[in-house]
Image: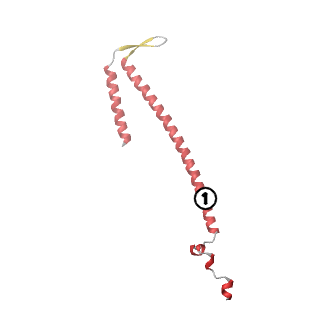
Amino acid sequence: MRLLWRLIVGLFLAVVVAVFAVINVQVEAIHFLFGTAHVPLVLIILGSAFVGGLVVGFIGIVLQFRLRRRNSQLRREVEKHKAQLDKLQENQTEVLDGKPEVPQEEASAPASEEPSADAESS
């Protein structure tokens, strides 16, 4: 839908520029460093619009190229981090599987509650 609106606005602006250019048909002098040229104003307007479109298009292509390159860099970084995460999870599983689980009650029981050998003999 967004592309459709851009197309409609672009076509509207193109029609406005074309109508403006056709209305201005008188010949104008363009002064360059090396001379002067007499060109119809319609060509100056259409040429300026065309060059402006090329500049905007070129800038858009450059920005899109930069964004795609950055996107691919970030995707590679995400894959690297996923691989590291998988490796850490695998190591954590190996460590936990290697240790016997100690119930909390036995681990926290004080040593004085166990019967001693002297108490049994009396």
Q: Is residue 37 above or below residue 74?
A: above
The residue sitting at the top extreme is: 35
The residue lying toward the viewer, choosing from 104 and 20, is: 104
Residue at the (34%, 30%) spot, across then down: 13
Q: Is residue 79 left or right of residue 119?
A: left
Residue at the (45%, 32%) spot, across then down: 57
Q: Is residue 9 left or right of residue 70?
A: left
Residue that carries the numbered disc 1 in the rendered image? 88
Name the spot of residue 80 as percent of width and height, x first: 59, 51
Residue at the (41%, 23%) spot, across then down: 48
The residue lying toward the viewer, choosing from 39 and 33, is: 33
Q: Is residue 76 above or below residue 117?
A: above
Name the spot of residue 54 as percent of width and height, x first: 45, 29
The residue lying toward the viewer, choosing from 31 and 73, is: 73
Q: Quadrant of the C terminus?
A: bottom right
Residue 40 in which image quadrant: top left
Residue 16 in which image quadrant: top left
Give, as a three-letter code, the residue at label 1: Leu
Residue at the (61%, 62%) spot, across then down: 92
The residue sitting at the bottom extreme is: 122
Name the spot of residue 46 as percent of width and height, x first: 39, 23
Name the spot of residue 38 as percent of width and height, x first: 40, 12
Q: Is residue 5 above or below residue 26?
A: below
Give the total number of marks visible in the rendering: 1
